[in-house]
Amino acid sequence: MEPANSPSKAAMISEADITLGEVDKALVEKGKSTYDVKCQACHSIGENRVVGPGWKGMLTRRKPEWVMNMILNTEAMLSTDAEAQKQLEQCLVRMPNQNLSKDDARNVVEFMRTL
Amino acid sequence: MKRSIIITGGTLGAAAGLFMLVNTLPGCRPSTNVQSAVTGDAANKAYVKPGAYDEFYNFVSGGFSGQLSVYGIPSGRMLRNIPVFSVNPESGWGFSEETKPMLMTTHGFIPWDDSHHPELSQTDGVPDGKWCFINGNNTPRIALVDLGTFRTKSIIEIPNSAGNHSSPFTTGNSEYVVAGTRFSIPMGTDEQRDVSIDSYRENFKGTVSFIHPDPATGKLDIAFQVITPGVNFDLSHAGKGPSEGWFFFSCYNSEQAYSLLEVNASQKDKDFVMALNWKKAEEYAKAGKGRMVPGKHYMNWYDDAKHTGISEVRNEVLQLDPRELKDLIYFMPCPKSPHGCDVDPTGQYIVGSGKLAALIPVFQFSKIQEAIAKNDVEGDFMGIPVLKYASVIKGEVKKPGLGPLHTEFDANGFAYTSFFVSSEIVKWSLETLEPVDRVPTYYSIGHLCVPGGDSKKPWGKYVIAYNKITKDRYLPTGPELAQSAQLFSIDGPKMELLLDFPTIGEPHYAQALPAELVKPREVKFFKIEENQHPYAAKGEKEAKVVREGNKVHVYMTTIRSHFTPDNIEGIKLGDEVYFHVTNFEQDWDVPHGFAIKGAATAELLVMPGETQTMKWIPDQIGVTPMYCTDFCSALHQEMQGYIRVSPANSKVELKGVTKSYDAGS
Ligand SMILES: [Cu+2]
């Protein structure tokens, strides 16, 4: 019997999967509450690093689908994506997969748009 | 390589004499050449390459370790040691506030037991991979281990029982698991229990209890208890197929001895197998034919949403008396102190193993039914009918070896019986009752296990021996040597030794099933949103320190790799501090540990999404360190904090913080 290789088998998110319209206040609120429980321990919403990079201006640096993949396919990103690996070299802690649903991750992106 | 077996006849003297010899003389082991017992491709058959999975899970009792260990088969690699009846400092089992209730009994908190028989839950008579039951022998209890979490979910204490040995065998759909007394005892009020030991015959009784596991929650509850004459119950198995609805128990000490049992309980030529009609018993219980009798007991259950063990206490138990309910139990004579009591896959045959006999009686269910219908009895034992031996047996396996103990089955009509005294496994045909093959075991085998081997559909493939003595098989380790198991292939006509592997405690009995039935159930983490622990901190925003009189509650979080709060001040001598540690990682395989210098308890090991509590009574003034014990990231060694302890009258303000110099907030 062979074990499955990747702990996370969720499909990678592509550009076509996300459209950004007007900032949706309701989604922002939901994204913030997910942040409070599952991300805040390691990410500030300012510029400074805690365990991981600060989130200010995230979507000016990163494409939304890249961010979604970082959240939903963390292991795959840390082992294949050059940008994510650069961050890991600096932070030295592997970002945990916090097992968000796709909707939760989308809400977090919405929240990031306000930062 | 066959050895000749010396059979000196079925007399007690000869069998018992040999029994002692083999046990005490080091030179008395089989002289088979060790090398020659293993053939060329054995290594291949037991080899599982790095990164690949084993085909079977093997759940092995920890014996006097009180635990349940898990091995992969065929590699014999140990995967896990699950704490059940004994505390386990490694995981905080029995040390954290949440797990302490699991080990509560009417005698108070008990940190240990002797666990004997793992039994997998069944659907339609076949192991289903949902639960594994195991008995606590010493302080009678039954536990249910959830195979989704590999943790003990439920432990129930058995009242009116002493030495819970013939347990916890299951009915075909796990409607019930049974718990039978090894020791009979006086029961009832204080006065009824405070009697002379000499009055055994008059005052001592046995019980077999039927415990119902709730299918949804895994909570264990005693449905009813059948009171029996005073004997020792040893093992049991449920009927299946045609014998579905019946349960069979081996009993010894029909002499009703209460001293020097070694001699006094080995007098008679035959003891009994007890046949119990559990469907009838269930009917009587539901129809109100039983009575509630004193039987105080604890029911402990672990709530995976609250992450907390909860104890309930019951004062009574429903008892059925077969002297009034005449068609409930029947005794069948069985040669010489029967041990194993095993039902074949078709459910037609019940194999008794007289451990001091040199034969194996095979009872036939249809004949038992005829004998009952025709009242074909040879008398009664303490008011219970005893069926005629000749009327209820299919036949005897003659001179198979010495000291037959236990039998498991394959799917092809063969039985595998362990022989303690002659230290071997004998394969025999259920049809002809003739031995067809034998292999030596190293040494003195007790139980044995074929995957699914006590069920309706054995998977076969292997038989695993659980040995009582290893002597020269492993590197010596002082006076106490490794306990061990041995894996044999049973695919071919000849059994073939593949592997020895050491085990934990005493590997008393074990069961195995295909990994595919268990793997899909695995819980990888607990969802933090669903955590209902009253002191959970879901995210660092909820981390805080709260004083209630001299009790201080620290709502603490862990994530790789820091605690919040990690600087705590305002604790005073005389305080009782409760660290409620929530690990809000939501990823597989990332527990965090928690330890405090000088804490008179074990560490906590907190699974992702879980909350666990350490109670700490500071005893020295100063600044005390705490840290994470489980290597959680490259910065694990940085996962630490300080707790300041001040004198009882100090005015230091209570606070808990984690400061980030970089983020500033
Ligand atoms: Cu840690």
Image (tube, coloured by chain):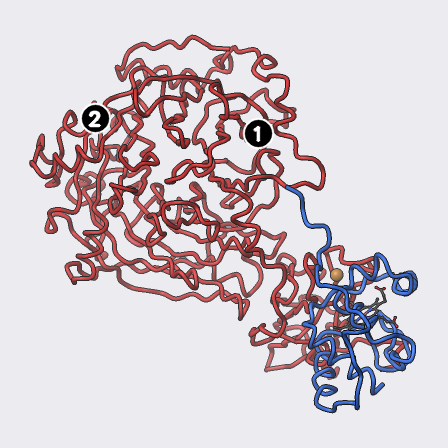
x and y, in percent, of residue B384 in the image: 13, 40
Determine if residue B615 is in view: no
Q: Are marks 1 and 2 on the same chain?
A: yes
- Circle count: 2
Closer to viewer: mark 1 or mark 2: 2
In terms of image quadrants, where is residue B651?
bottom right
SS class, disc 1: loop
**Vertical relation: B420 (above or below) B282:** above
Q: Residue B428 versus residue B109: which sits nearer the camera? A: B428
Q: Residue B416 versus residue B331: which sits nearer the camera? A: B416
Q: Residue at the location (49% across, 63% down)? A: B302
**Vertical relation: B184 (above or below) B448:** below
Label the blue chain with its letter. Answer: A
Q: Residue B446 versus residue B298: which sits nearer the camera? A: B446
Q: Residue at the location (42% across, 36% down)? A: B453
Disc 2 target residue: B270
Label the red chain with its letter. Answer: B
Determine if residue B600 is in view: yes
Name which residue type carries label 2: Lys
